[in-house]
Amino acid sequence: MSRRLIRIAIIIAALALATTAVSACGSGPATTSGAKAADFAGLWVNPEFNNEIWLHATASGDAVALRWEREWDPPVMQQATVQNDGTLKAPGVPVPADPAANGGGEAAYTGRLTADGGLDMATTTHVTGVDAAIPVTIHFVRGSQAKYAVFAARMNKNLKEQRIGDAFSQALATIGKGIGAWQDARGLIKAPPVSAVRPGGAVDKALQANGKTWPRLSDGRLLQPGTGLGEYVYRPLRNGYRISGRAEDGQGPMTTSTTW
């Protein structure tokens, strides 16, 4: 399971376990009757969890565009509509097979303004071992631009590190695909020599023959062999190979290996 999926699972579990506590932490009676889209607009923050959730709401007619931001996940957009009873209905945004592709998604929510000037976003979730939908309510309060700026700087730093790490991990995997193409072209089940696994080498040419290119780092530079940051070490083994290295920002070590 990827780091991002693990974090999402932890957050969901924390939300489920904290439902009672959240409902008791200052969430007043609902005041949604007669609420308009403009009443939901603005910057909201949920301060109850270590992983802060910020919610940007932009109103247009009866529609409200929601932008969810968390410290470790790319922002997710969700479209919502104000109902006749003043509640905010936000259909779910599905989580794709690869969350790294576009930031994952959000569950379906029903939003209600509260008497204390807050916003309750109610949904349901499932927890392993529990055969029932568990109600979860996230209580938001109005957020300040100053506090958001601190959060945004931290989030952007984390997302940049993730992009660098993801690009490096993918680059190592691409070399592995090139090795597979090299083997297929020769009908061999053995690891290529070190001299073949580098830009311009036989593995690079095998990638090109399959319509692919030698991998690059997040800044566009070609991945090069070496022991420094942003470089890789390829080792052929008797029954496979190993490719390892650290991303250019020091993340890692990251490794891809194959045995046969």
Image: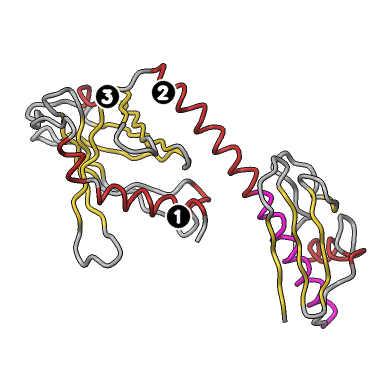
Q: Name the amino acid type tagged 1.
A: Ile
Magenta span includes 176: yes
What residue appears at the point 82 percent right and 62 percent down from the top-left corner?
234
In the rendered structure, the answer to whether residue 157 lies left or right of residue 223 reads left
Q: Position of residue 85 (x, y in %)?
A: 8, 35
Q: Is residue 59 above or below residue 107?
A: above
Per the image, the residue denoted by label 2 is: 148
Magenta-tinted stretch: 167-187
Name which residue type carries label 2.
Tyr
On screen, residue 35 versus residue 193, left or right, reads left
Q: Quadrant of the C terminus?
A: bottom right
Against 236, residue 56 (above or below) is above
Q: Position of residue 240 (x, y in %)?
A: 77, 76
Task: Determine the secondary structure under disc 1.
Answer: helix
Q: Please determine whether, in this image, residue 9 is positioned above or below residue 150.
A: below
Location of residue 83 in the rendering, given as x and y in whole percent from the top left corner: 14, 36
Q: Residue under label 3, please give it.
A: 41
